[in-house]
Image: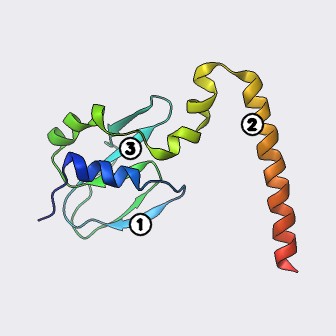
Amino acid sequence: MVKDTFETATAKIKKRTRYGMRTEIAEQNGQIISWSNNQARWMLWNIGPDPKKGVKIELDANMVLLYATPKEIKSWLPNLPYLPLYANSYESVYEKRGDKEKVCECDAILEKALEELKRELKRCKR
């Protein structure tokens, strides 16, 4: 039987470095934790049924499937590392600092990057 510890939960979190959905098959009954950028913390996911052994689970980038009791997981939540993706989030970088000038600067950089990606995509299609 697989059982997560605080250390294995931390290792799973540190692997969450890519955006997008992914599918995992539950090795046994488990629990899902979800990161909130707004609150900058992990929470026990309580929307929908708990993952059951053998079931395919669709998880977003801010979600981690753990094999431990809700009581154990709740005791870890305050000490788990931040989601790696949070460092680049709007909430982390600008909103909580109230830095509106940086938000505009960031939007301009993203707009420029999007244009470059569009040009590269057109070039690749040729």
Q: Residue at x 47, y 53 (%)?
A: 61
Q: Residues within 10 Å of mark 3 (few under 14, many from 20)?
A: some
Viewer-nearest of discs 2 and 1: 2
Q: Residue at x 36, y 66 (%)?
A: 24
Q: CA distance from mark 2 to mark 3?
A: 26 Å
SS category of the residue bearing label 3: strand
Seen as rendered, the residue at the extreme left is 1
Horizontally, residue 17 falls left or right of residue 3, namely right
Determine which quarter of the picture holds residue 45: top left
Instruction: Answer above or below: position of 90 versus 54.
Output: above
Q: CA distance from mark 3 to mark 1?
A: 15 Å
Seen as rendered, the residue at the extreme bottom is 126
User: Residue 59 placed where, x, y %?
Assistant: 42, 57
Which amino acid lies under the numbered mark 1 shown in the image of this protein? Thr
In the picture of the structure, the residue carrying the numbered disc 3 is 34
User: Residue 95 placed where, x, y %?
Assistant: 62, 25
Q: Residues within 10 Å of mark 2 (few under 14, many from 20)?
A: some
Which amino acid lies under the numbered mark 2 shown in the image of this protein? Cys
User: Residue 31 placed where, x, y %?
Assistant: 25, 50
In the picture of the structure, the residue carrying the numbered disc 1 is 23
In the picture of the structure, the residue carrying the numbered disc 2 is 106
Sequence-earlier tag: 2 or 1: 1
Sequence-earlier tag: 3 or 1: 1
State the quadrant of the N terminus.
bottom left
Q: Are marks 2 and 1 in contact (CB under 8 Å)?
A: no
SS category of the residue bearing label 1: strand
Q: Residue at x 27, y 57 (%)?
A: 51
Viewer-side residue, 98 vs 68 = 98
Viewer-side residue, 47 vs 65 = 65
Instruction: Answer above or below: position of 120 versus 125.
Output: above
Determine which quarter of the picture holds residue 33: top left
